Image (spheres, rainbow, N blue to C red):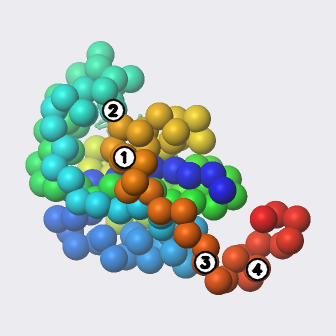
Amino acid sequence: MEKTLVILKPSCVQRALIGEVISRFEKKGLQLIGMKMMQLTDSILDVHYAHLKDKPFFQRVKNSMSASPVVVQCWAGNDAAKVVRNIIGITNGRNAAAGTIRGDFSMSAQENVVHASDSAESAEVELKRFFTDNEIFDYKISTQNYLYADDEI
Ligand code: ADP
């Protein structure tokens, strides 16, 4: 099964949206296989947001991501990275479609509640950044045959 990284940002933790966001991924049929609370540091954020280092808002985004603890999660499922990105919506919450997490809970380009890996390839790299191997749990769920057809498992 494909794995992807989700980070419940300080804007999620502070606004008490942790349960709401987890519930959306659970109800979709994704499997939670890793989760912990972390305080992010400037050094991990330098790497995680390296693609933004020349943007004027780089330091502001890093400050926002370290303003309180975050919850990091690993979700698994077929096409998990794409499915999760569809559920969270586009970056700017004001433009994100209603029904997505950002579309329903964010008014901001920065304070947009969740991070999710943008592809399966990025997820492999990002999961190693936040989790050790023994923090990811490979366990069977009994509902598998009701989530997927035989040829999808
Ligand atoms: P995404 O999180 O949708 O993959 P990016 O990787 O482009 O988006 O940006 C990472 C994070 O940086 C965003 O989730 C958001 O918190 C912040 N960000 C992106 N663009 C802006 C912007 N124009 N102004 C403020 N913050 C931004």
Q: Secondary structure at mark 4?
A: helix
Q: Nearer the viewer, mark 2 or mark 1?
A: 1
Q: Picture quarter containing residue 149?
A: bottom right
Q: Is residue 18 left or right of residue 66?
A: right
Q: Is residue 111 left or right of residue 75?
A: left
Q: What type is the residue that disc 1 sits on?
A: Thr
Q: Which mark is residue 145?
A: 4
Q: Earlier in the sequence, mark 4 or mark 1?
A: 1
- Label 3: few (<14), some (14–19) or many (≥20) C-alpha neighbours in 10 Å: few
Q: Is mark 3 within 8 Å of ligand 1?
A: no
Q: Do the residues bearing badges 3 and 1 touch, measured as CB atoms within 8 Å?
A: no
Q: CA distance from mark 2 to mark 4?
A: 36 Å
Residue that carries the numbered disc 2 in the rendered image: 48
Q: Above or below — where is 93 with respect to 130? A: below
Out of 140 and 85, give the one closest to the viewer: 140
Q: Picture quarter containing residue 109?
A: top left
